[in-house]
Amino acid sequence: MRIAVLGTGEVGRRLATAFAGLGHQVGLGSRTADNAEAVKWAEEHPGAAHGTFADVTEDAEVVVNATGGLVSLAALTAAGADGLRGKVVVDVSNPLDFSEGFPPKVVTFDGLSLAERIQAEFPGARVVKTLNTMTNTVMVEPGRVPGDHVVFVGGDDEAAKAVVTGLLGGLGWPAARIVDLGDLTSARATEQLMPLWLRLYGALGTGDFNFAVCVSGRS
Ligand SMILES: NC(=O)c1ccc[n+]([C@@H]2O[C@H](COP(=O)([O-])OP(=O)(O)OC[C@H]3O[C@@H](n4cnc5c(N)ncnc54)[C@H](OP(=O)(O)O)[C@@H]3O)[C@@H](O)[C@H]2O)c1
């Protein structure tokens, strides 16, 4: 698939590398066309592209939002409503406010999650929330954590969720461990897992963990 990854941070580069390694045509997007991280990444990945958020979004089929949660609306606005129309937008961001130090606050938008806020701002996009409940290394290599831990998906567009489920399968997530939480309001829950995730990170001293859901009577 043609995948635009918006975000040159650790998460964006990790996902872009994984998708490129799986044979997808990947463009890594930034605010500027000459972002040093994006240039370096594209040099290391022959066939991959880099450019502004709008450049990489233009021809993409899938757009991954891997920008800071408090700047995601700005980044997607730069990508452009026209460029996002009809596209699957995979939102892996978390709306964390570090302005008063650690731990950060999880921001809501008049009671909405960031994913819902993005969907409201870009009604032509097909937003799916996923992967935001784990560290980036686990996103692309679930096997590094033992056990039947899960990845959540939520979104209003069933076909878009099917596309995302396929991409998650490519990253190594077995179908049985991809938990569909329903519509995009489920992002209120998964974004609000962040305080628990951060507590566990402090208690365990590592980000290499994940959430599992065990159901009585099911193996
Ligand atoms: N760290 C993890 O393992 C992890 C796990 C789950 C979810 N997340 C979430 O994933 C997202 C990405 O995290 P990250 O640490 O890789 O990156 P980040 O530092 O949160 O974000 C980097 C991206 O944000 C863009 N950006 C910064 N200020 C901007 C602005 N004013 N307007 C538009 N774009 C702006 C940057 O653009 P330039 O390229 O132009 O600099 C860059 O592409 C976050 O929402 C984070 O909460 C992280």
Image (spheres, rainbow, N blue to C red):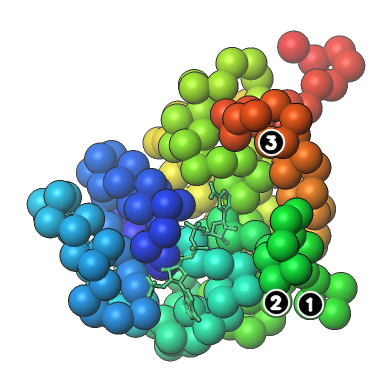
Question: Image check: 95 left or right of 71?
Answer: right
How crowded pointer 1 is (Cα within 10 Å; few <14, some 14-19, many 20+) is rated as few
Residue at the disc numbered 1? 109
Could you tell me how far apart the alpha carbons at marks 3 and 2 are, in whole angstroms? 27 Å
Q: Nearer the viewer, residue 22 or 144?
A: 144
Please tell me which residue is depicted at 72% across the width and 36% down the height of the picture: 202
Question: Image check: 33 left or right of 192?
Answer: left
- Do labels 1 and 2 touch, CB within 8 Å? yes
Q: Amino acid type of disc 2?
A: Arg
Please tell me which residue is depicted at 70% across the width and 71% down the height of the picture: 99
- Do labels 3 and 2 touch, CB within 8 Å? no
**Coordinates of residue 89 in the picture (x, y in percent):** 51, 65
Secondary structure at badge 3 equals helix
Residue at the disc numbered 2? 117
Q: What residue occupies the far front of the structure in this picture?
A: 101
**Coordinates of residue 18 in the picture (x, y in percent):** 33, 42
How crowded pointer 3 is (Cα within 10 Å; few <14, some 14-19, many 20+) is rated as some
> Which numbered disc covers residue 201?
3
* Residue 127, image quadrant: bottom right
